[in-house]
Image (spheres, rainbow, N blue to C red):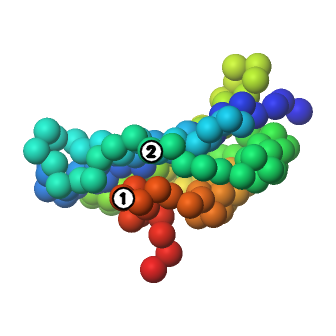
Amino acid sequence: MRDVVRVVYMTQTGATLPELQWSEEISITTTRTTLVREGKVSVSHINTGNWEIISDSSAVTALFDQLKLVDCSRIKRIEPTDSPDGGDTESYTVHYQNGDRCSLYYDPGAKYENGDLIGKPIREFIQSLNFPLGSESRYVER
């Protein structure tokens, strides 16, 4: 088993107006969770910024403990027959203490066999966070 030291969730918009395009990164470590949101152009309509998110250290430990049990070699990318035009992309990267990484990159139409072993616990952790005012719009359940 390899100890997890950092988890990174990234997402970015697909084909849309340049002023509505964005990219985000949520970085989770044992000491902090941060969100960085950027617009793709200088005149952006996106709520950009850097936010530190208070997270429960026991929840981070539970997430890291769950992820360190995943055998990344069992996760296989499934390419689409026809890639759809546009669409958002997202990626999940688990960083291990020994320098290894397990990365899943979901571009439009791509799937992973056993991908939920990584994606599901990370999504659940992110949904449990209390985002600071002004940063939460994409993650708050409606």
Q: State the residue at coordinates (39%, 65%).
A: 137
Q: Which residue is mark 2?
A: 51
Q: State the residue at coordinates (70%, 20%).
A: 99
Question: Under tag 2, what secondary structure?
Answer: strand
Find residue 98 and report its horizontal and vertical position in percent.
Answer: 76, 19
Q: Quadrant of residue 88?
A: bottom left
For residue 41, which numbered disc appears in the image?
none
Q: Quadrant of residue 16?
A: bottom left
Above or below, comparing residue 67 to residue 110 in the picture: above
Above or below, comparing residue 137 to residue 3 in the picture: below
Q: State the residue at coordinates (56%, 61%).
A: 130
Residue farthest toward the top in the current orientation of the protein? 98
Q: CA distance from mark 1 to mark 2?
A: 9 Å
Residue farthest toward the left in the current orientation of the protein? 43
Q: Are marks 1 and 2 in contact (CB under 8 Å)?
A: yes
Which quarter shows the N terminus? Answer: top right
Is residue 4 visible to the viewer in this orientation of the structure? yes
Residue type of the residue flagged with mark 2: Trp
Which quarter shows the C terminus? Answer: bottom left
Which of pointers 1 and 2 lies earlier in the amino acid sequence? 2
Q: Nearer the viewer, residue 43 or 99?
A: 43
Residue type of the residue flagged with mark 1: Gly
Q: Which residue is mark 1?
A: 134
Q: Quadrant of residue 114?
A: bottom right
- For label 1, count other residues whose C-alpha is less than 10 Å away and answer few (under 14), some (14-19) or many (20+): few
